[in-house]
Structure formats: C-alpha cells, structure tokens
Amino acid sequence: MNESSFERKPITIDDVAREAGVSVSTVSRILNDKPDVSRMTRQRVQAVIDRLGYVPNLQAKGLAAGKSRMISLLFPMEHAQFTQLELDFFVGAAEAAGKRGYFLNLYTEPMDDAGLLNLYRSGQIEGAILMQIRMDDWRPALLRQHRHAFVMIGRCADNQDFRFIDLDFEGGIALAVAHLVEMGRRYIGFVARPPEMRTAKLGPAVRLLDGYLKACEQNGLTPLYREAGMSADAVYTAANSLLDEQPTLNALITVSGAAAVGAIRAVTERGRRVPEDVSIVSLASNRIATLITPSLTAINFPTDKMGYEAARMLINALEHPERKTEQVLLAPKLVIRESSAPLRGQHESAV
Amino acid sequence: MNESSFERKPITIDDVAREAGVSVSTVSRILNDKPDVSRMTRQRVQAVIDRLGYVPNLQAKGLAAGKSRMISLLFPMEHAQFTQLELDFFVGAAEAAGKRGYFLNLYTEPMDDAGLLNLYRSGQIEGAILMQIRMDDWRPALLRQHRHAFVMIGRCADNQDFRFIDLDFEGGIALAVAHLVEMGRRYIGFVARPPEMRTAKLGPAVRLLDGYLKACEQNGLTPLYREAGMSADAVYTAANSLLDEQPTLNALITVSGAAAVGAIRAVTERGRRVPEDVSIVSLASNRIATLITPSLTAINFPTDKMGYEAARMLINALEHPERKTEQVLLAPKLVIRESSAPLRGQHESAV
DNA sequence: TTGTAAGCGTTATCAG
DNA sequence: CTGATAACGCTTACAA
C-alpha cells in the first residue's frame, strides 16, 4: 500500500505546467496541436503529460471553447416504437461520434419548436440528427433559419439543401416488384405501414406505398394492398385478408422482418408454400433476414451504416461549415435468399 | 422579420438575474431547489426563467459542481461482437440515464488499469457499467480500491459486496433441462459458447456449461455438448456433429436466437421435425424468439430491463452512497412456445 | 432571505 | 516562441 493513495484529485493542466516548468498556455497549445511551440518544449511537456497520465477535463474545455461536443439523435416516439431499426441507427451514430470525440445522446420525447431551439441555445448540443422525418416536417426550416446544424435520417418532400441520408424507398419497392415479375409472378400484394404513419406523412410510409402503386402501374399489375400495424400478428391478419380477396396472389411484399414473419405464417397456414406458391420480399437488414425461415429475399436496409454516416456528416458540417452540404440517397440493394423463387418451380407437387 | 434575430447568444443565469432584479446566487438556489428563498422571489424568478426559456448550461454546472453527470458502459469487444444483446443493454441503460439527467456513453476498446482509472480521474465519468465480466475479473477490485462507483452486468466468482445485476444462468439451464425431461426427452444435447469465451472465463460461457453438466447429473442424463461460435452457421455444424454422434438425440439447448436457427436447420435438413422429433430450447429475448420459426421456447433474457436497472443502480450509488449495495440475480423464466413439445406427439407420421 | 466573490479547468487574446 | 490574464456559466461558502 505505498504507490496508490485513495481519492487523488484529478490532475489538471496546472499540475502539468508546474511540473514541466512552463505556463498553462504552452501546455494548452501542445494539447491542441497549435503551432508556435518549440520542438524541445513540446517533447518535454508531452513527457510530463504521459508520466502524470493527465487527461484534459472535457467540461472545462467545452465551457472555455463554447462547445459541448455533444450531438443528439432526435427520435420522437409517436407512431413508432424503438425497434431494431432505430437501435441500429443509434449504435452506428454513437460509433461515428465516439471516433471523432463527440458524445451522442438520445431524445425520444416529442418536442415543440421552443424545445428544439432550447437544446441548441442552452448549449446542450451542437448539432442533431433528426429522425421520423415527415414529408412536410417543420424542423429543418426552423433549424436552418436559426443556423443550427442538423442532418436528417430520412427526407422531406422539399429538401432544399438540407443535409440528409435516406434510402430510396420507391426504388426499393420497384426493385422488389421487378424481381417478382421476373420470377413470373404478376399477382403481387403489399402490406403497407399503418395508416396513421401515412397520414402523419412519414417519409417511408408515404414513399413505400407510392412506390408500390407506381411499380404496379409500370408493370401493368393490379395493385392490392392493406395498411397494417408493424407487428407479426397485425401483418398476419392483413395478409390473410389479402389472400382471401385475391386467391391467385402469388407474391407478397412486406416492410419489415417481423412483418414478413406474419406474412409467412398466413401463407403456410393455408397450406401454401413459401416461396413456391407465394414468394415474399421484404425490407430487412441482413441480420434479421437471415434469422427468419425461409431466409428473406430482402431490400437491404443498411441501418448501422446510415447511422454512422449521419453522424459523420453532422460532425463534418460542424467542423467544416464551408464545405457544401451532402445529400445521400442510398440505392437499394436486393439480396435474393430463400423466400422468393420462380413461379414454375412447382415440380415436387407430391410429398 | 421582427421577432427572431439570428444567432442569439445563449441566455445565461446572469440574464435571468438581471431581468428578475436579483443576484445570480438566488437564481442558482431556485434552480437547484435549495431552501432559504422566499416564496415571492421564487415565483418571480421562475416566471422570468420561463419567459426567457432559460436552460442551464450543463458543462458550466458540471464544472462548478465537480461533476460530469456522465456514466459509461464499458464493453470491451474482444471475444464478442456487439449483438442484439449488448444493443439492448445499451438502450435500456441510456433510457434510465436520460431519465435521471445523466449521459451515457459507450467504450468498446479494451482498457488496461491505467486507462480505466483515467476515465474517472480525468473527470470524464462519474461511474461505469462494466460488461463482459470474467469470473476472475480484475476491474471490480481496482475500482473498489480507488473508491470509484461501478456496477456490473454479470458477476465474478467472488463478488464480495460489488454491485451487480445478472441472470442466473445455471438456473436457466436447469429450467430448460427440466422442461425437456418433462416433455419425455432424455437425450438432450447442448451447443455451448465458443471455447475461447470459456477459457477467458466469461461468466455466461462458464456458468452455462457448468449448469448443463450439473443438470445432466441431477437428472441422470449423459451430457453431450459441443462448443461453437455464435453464428447460425457455426451452430449448424456443431448440431450436425452432435446428431451424428448420437442419433437418438431428441432435444437441443442453444444459447442465442441465431444459434437456435442453426440448430433448427441442422435438424430439419435431416428430415427430422422440430419440435416433435427434436425439441429446442434456447436463451433468447422475446423479440428474437418470436421472429424465428418455429417460435422458440426460451429462457427469457430481459436485456433491456437489465440495462435499465444497471444504470439505475449506478446512479443511485452515485447519489446515495450511504445506501447498501444492491446485488440482483434475476430468476430465469421459461417461456414455452412452439419449438418444444412432448415426445410422444408423433401422431401424424404419415404425410 | 439575499448578495458578493472566489473558484471549477480550460481556451484565447494580447503582450513580451 | 512563451506567459499573463480575462473570459466561459455556474455553485457555494461567507457576508450582510
């Protein structure tokens, strides 16, 4: 019990300065890689820093510099739970933030404009990642007006030069429909997101349904869809209703892994097979798609990458305001797995 | 363009004080619910605060008070990826932290003792949630010695009076085995965690295998297990090896949702049915268990609750050091779903 | 009950 | 190239 005494007070920049025989300003310069420091002093001071195990106090640093190095993910939980999707966004963003020395925190309570502005004005955050973007979202314009940094995961109807990263949902659905048509299927049903999401003008809900209708038109198909909750059970019911109305249905498109599970159940319970009788294509991340049986042919949703990129874009905007704003619309990728197959694959009809 | 001018500077406590005609200390007292303030001034100042939309600057507050209100989740990514499990812990903890006005951040790089102590000494964090706890983990003793606050998700072999929350893994496996025995099954295989996790003495890896061996002994069963990676593919291989060695196997226990998927695949590919021929019980959260077909009979792993509780315990320790330390060992719950069934359920043997 | 003033650990400005 | 010194916004004795 000689080396370590209990409860040592944190080592400060003063300690380092005194120990190295220089002023605090010199230490500060070294800490922040400023020029105008002789190599010799730099080395000497650095040695002291290492020996003492000194780490700067972030709060003091932030206070002095007028920066909090805090960004936040704004996910108003209204028409949504915090699912795998949002989780992945969050983790990706947290990783990117960490790498650049920023902290990420999460706000899930819905906020009015005063609340949102306060977040910035109070110095709590330097920037925000906006989620649950509505087609006519009021937040981007407000933040822009007040010159506050933000990036959207998602996008509005009119995006001006707002920073965003989003998936091309229309394109994704088009890809899914094209794939199914190629498989010889022309009776393609769709289980859309719940109606309250569409009336709230949430981007994905609107664009997925639009994309479906458009793709049907372009392929000369008769659209047939239901709007349903996001749970497997809700989609199970919706899929049944679809299969009742149109018994010739030979393909279904769903918008999440859980939804696909519900659809698969509805199909198999009536003695029809996936993918032979009814093929299923869904929006899903690789992780979820491979967990499900049969593994899902899916429009890949690279959620963690999106969260990561969003944070990266935001921090870049913070540190290099002069650079031009990035707008990233990810091209959808179709990953073919077991839940889709050509229509005439009905050989083994005996069992 | 009259109301809102651009780039207003943040409103400070001085602004409030001036506007209300009192001193900053009075405002500070009101902000922190201290006594010794007349009802009248309190009201008057509060009105000003509301009108101005003033929010205290957390950095300044922390600096002055010598507190960072920052806690972190320490998850050294060595023998693990950041999976659904850890994700859930994180989100739960973030939620609890947010509710109490703390920030949670995540460290995934492994740390040596100097690094760990620096986190506290530099004032970066007030407390930590430790994950990936080894049976002989060195971190709790070190932190205790330096009087630093922490709580473990997991536990060591010797936990003294360290704060922790963990699942009773031995009990969970015992429950799984008991359930399968009750279903009339006595050839119960086990796909354990990978050997490197066991040799690293990670709690769950050690306790799950121990629990399995013990449960076999108590039920007079012959243990038969493989250690395998956590991916579906690795478990698929392991399960096949198990089924080759012991064709009479009629039950399998796995340790994650993905593992169960691999096991199910191995069983069904040899023309045997789940649950009739081979029942499967797995460790899994409700969300994952219901995503899989057949839905998993599972030892419920309440991950988000554990993360939440861990953060709550930590913050309590921070704010009420006098209270006695909590040690929470969660009793496992078995949720019976479709992947397990009585052995003699082999009626419809014709197809 | 209220006010004054000295920090908290940095950064940044401005002289040397 | 280096060093004083004044912020940064808040808390907290200590006075009044």
Image (tube, coloured by chain):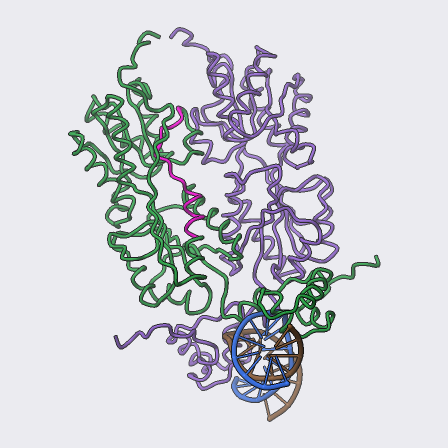
Chain colours: A green, B purple, C blue, D brown
- Dividing the image into 4 quarters, which one contains the N terminus of chain A? bottom right
A306 relative to B224, above or below: below
Q: Which residues are magenta?
A: A294-311
Residue A181 in picture, x, y percent from top left: 24, 25
Check if residue B241 falls in the magenta segment. Answer: no
Taking the image as shown, residue B312 lies to the left or right of residue A116, namely right
A291 relative to A35, above or below: above
- Dividing the image into 4 quarters, which one contains the C terminus of chain A? top left
**Figure disc tally:** 0
Taking the image as shown, residue A215 lies to the left or right of residue B146, namely left
Write down the quadrant of residue B208 in the picture.
top right
Write down the quadrant of residue B67 in the picture.
bottom right
Residue B46 in picture, x, y percent from top left: 43, 76
Q: Nearer the viewer, residue B351 or A319?
A: A319
Q: Nearer the viewer, residue A3 or A335?
A: A335
Taking the image as shown, residue A69 lies to the left or right of residue C10, namely left
Residue B309 in picture, x, y percent from top left: 56, 49
Which residue is rendered at x = 45% and y = 70% of the image?
A: B55
A97 relative to A341, above or below: below
Which residue is rendered at x = 66% and y = 56% of the image?
A: B149
B319 relative to B163, above or below: below
The outermost residue toward the right is: A2
Q: Nearer the viewer, residue A296 or A14?
A: A14
